[in-house]
Each structure stands twice: as C-alpha cells, then as structure tokens.
Image (cartoon, grey):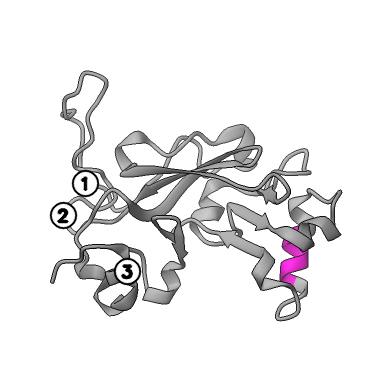
Amino acid sequence: MSYKSYKDFIEDPGKVYFLKRKASFGNIIDFEKKGNRVVFYLGYKDDEWGWTNKNYKDQTGKTPDWLKPSDDYYGDDWDDASYEHNAGRVYDEFIQTVRIYYYDTDWKIIEPCDGEINSKYSKEDFKNGKVPCIIIIRDELAQKFDNEYRFSFWWDYINNNEGDYDYQNVECFYFGDILINGITLESKEFGGTF
C-alpha cells in the first residue's frame, strides 16, 4: 500500500513500517534553538541502510567511499555533558531533512541548558529519552510565569504536576519523536521508531 499524504499515515498507524519514505517527515535526531526559532534535524531508520542517508553527497556532490550503513546516529562528543559546550551537531550523513519552526514570541522555547551555567545532560541523554530537547510553553502559562526561563523549573513543573498542569500549553519534543508536516507524533505511540 502506498501513502499519498501524512493524513493516510495518521489514519492507518498500524502500517507505519510500510510507509514509503518522503523527505517531509522523520524522527527528531538533533536540534538547534536560537530565540524562538527551532531547527529540527530529521532522519529515519531504513532496513537496508539503518540511520544512514543513502543519498548523502559530500561537498563535491559525490557519494563518499566511506559511507556505510549504521544502526545508530550520533555526532562528535555526544556522550559528554554538558552538551551545549561539548557536543557537535549530528553528522551530516544521518540527516534526511531539516524542519525549521518559528514560534510566537510570547511563548517560551526552553532547552535543557537554559538558565544553567552547565547543563547536566549529554545528547546521549536526549537519545535515551531522559529529558526532552525542547519544551514549548504557550499562551497563558507563559504569561503566568513570565520571568521563568530555567529548564530545571519547567522540567520540575511538568514532572511534579502530572495530570494537573495545562497540557494545552505545554509541548515537549524528544529525540525519536516523529514530525510530519508540522505535526508531532510520539514514536512510543507506534511501538518504536519510524
């Protein structure tokens, strides 16, 4: 069965592993935040090439001889905390596409290093689902805590108010979450990565 749009995918989540891959969606494998702009680097695991983008080309426009399938994606110093001072971006050969989002300037866009001198997280922690890479605080909740930009505050708020905080105004993005044309689907809903 072929899928013509992300709507087909959503209506038939049991067929996720048969979905024909397109460059408009994939798993979050890295991110960059600057102000209210977030860049998500997306990839997916292919049966033949693993996480490697088999269409990767180097600066000369050719497929490098060293390009090989990989069962993992990674970047330089991803096992070192604090990620903001040590880790590089995911290696280019794993990136399938890039999605750039601009959020309302009244919203808070929080990453784990915000409000910290040195965060205690590595990018491996993000891959393992220890914390989200981005938390978005919307509307009234952002206004209620107008001067609060510390990741630790918001992470505690989410974890200590389970079932009691405003889900409509908080969104967490984790490595492995699936982005489809601006829609976020958590990979755990489908029993694995896409």
Residue 177 seen in the figure: no
Residue 72 on image: x %, y % = 34, 51
Q: Which residue is drawn at 66% across and 37% down?
A: 35
Indicate the secondary structure of the residue bearing disc 1: loop
* 146 relative position to 185: left or right: right
User: What's the residue at 72%, 61% (across, down)?
Assistant: 155
Question: Would you say the residues marked 2 and 3 are in contact, meaning their CB atoms lie under 8 Å apart?
Answer: no
Please give the residue where the numbered disc 1 appears in the rendered image: 69
> Which is nearer the N-term, disc 2 or disc 3?
3
* Nearer to me, 88 or 158: 158
Sequence-first disc among 1 and 2? 2
Magenta segment main secondary structure: helix
Q: Which of marks 1 and 3 is in front?
A: 3
Q: Quadrant of the C terminus?
A: bottom left
Q: In the image, residue 140 lies at what x, y percent?
A: 78, 62
- Residue 15 in the image: x percent, y percent? 24, 75
> Callout 3, which amino acid?
Lys
Q: What element carries label 3?
A: helix
**Quadrant of the rendered structure where residue 11 is?**
bottom left
Q: Nearer the viewer, residue 41 or 121?
A: 41
Instruction: Give the class, few, some or many, for how many residues have Cα within 10 Å of label 1's Cα (few <14, many ≥20).
Output: some
Gap between marks 1 and 2, in whole Å?
Answer: 7 Å
Split into 4 quadrants, where in the image is the N terminus? Answer: bottom left
Q: Few, some or many C-alpha atoms within 10 Å of disc 3 (few <14, some 14-19, many ≥20)?
A: few
**SS assignment at label 2:** loop
Give, as a single range, the part of the protein colored magenta. Answer: 154-159
Name the residue that disc number 3 marks: 7
Which residue matches tag 2? 48
Which three-letter amino acid code belongs to the residue tagged 2? Glu
